Amino acid sequence: MKYVLAPLAGFTDAPFRRLCHEGGADLTYTEMVSAAGLAHGSSPTQHLLETMDGEGPVAVQLFGATESDLAYATRYIEESFVRRSTFNLQPSALFTEVNLNAGCPMTKVTREGAGAKLIEDPEKIYRLLKAMVENTSLPVTLKTRLGPHPRKTNIFEIVDAAEKAGAKGLVLHARYTSQMHGGEVHLDRLREVVDRARIPVTGNGSVVDAKTAAAMAETGVGAIMIGRAALARPFIFSELKMYESTSTSRFDCFRAHLKYLLEFRDILARKYPNDHIPSPDAFASVKMHVHLFRYFNGRPGAAELRRRLNQVRSLDEIDEAISTLGMV
């Protein structure tokens, strides 16, 4: 079984993707990238497309609501990364596919008519995917849900639209939009989709261990996507492949992640000299507050460590906080 890191806004940047690739992920996804942001030349949006050595294959996930924005964004990726890589004008591009998000239920995405809002209109999904397919040599895929709510399951219409548009794969979060990220994962429906689809299907939804992975594998999916469970366990992919505990320690992961963050910060500073890139201390501290503290959840002293890490402002303070609480 292949295992894939899900796109998670604020988390699946290049350093974390690299860590998950080393932890056994067969494919990783960028954070959601705004097609409108690329169309308007937003530099912070462009930052989301930057990669670093050692990541392995990466899929770009776009979100948007208009054919023109998604056509431009897909063409931008093609011209800026794929074609230049072919002629060795920059380091080899890692992107292996472009994915359309039609499943994110967050209000800031759906109020723009994007994400899960698209589920209500399979014909629009068709038009958006077709615009993407026509502007890239990379495979185009779709990530979506079963439908708006349990009273309206329209995933089969969506699959038909995706196949008609030329999509080469489907990632299905086996929940409804109304469920957000909780509640029952409908594996029976996922199995129906796998049976009827003519394109490969990747399953997504609350896979956290070997038991839940095995249950999803029984639906016949070709790959399994893991999101939140990887945040503090980037080696979960190897664990699931081996069906046994890995010897990789959380502290080792923390140290490696911090190292990659600083390397990635330097990449951004070199490539975007006119942008405000935070100092190494500030860059690491922000990520510490929102992400890195998760490595120590459930450990003795973790609550106190989290309190202290929420106050750190420098690399020295991070080292001191961890060392003082015996986390080394």
Image (cartoon, rainbow, N blue to C red):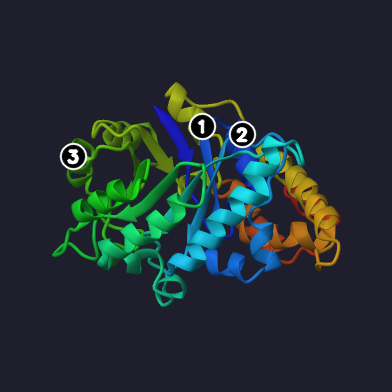
Q: Position of residue 218 (x, y in %)?
A: 24, 31
Q: CA distance from mark 1 to mark 2?
A: 8 Å
Q: Earlier in the sequence, mark 1 or mark 3?
A: 1
Q: Earlier in the sequence, mark 3 or mark 2?
A: 2
Question: Which residue is under mark 1?
Answer: 26
Q: Dot 1: few (<14), some (14–19), or many (≥20) neighbours within 10 Å?
A: some
Q: CA distance from mark 1 to mark 3?
A: 25 Å
In this rendered view, identify the residue nearer to me: 123 or 147. 123
In this rendered view, identify the residue nearer to me: 328 or 59. 59
Q: CA distance from mark 3 to mark 2?
A: 31 Å
Quadrant, the N terminus: top left
Q: Secondary structure at mark 2?
A: loop
Q: Earlier in the sequence, mark 1 or mark 2?
A: 1
Question: Which residue is under mark 3?
Answer: 196
Q: Position of residue 254 (x, y in %)?
A: 68, 43
* 109 sits to left or right of 121: right
Q: Give the label, 1 or 3, closer to the camera.
A: 3
Quadrant, the C terminus: top right
Question: Which residue is under mark 2?
Answer: 56
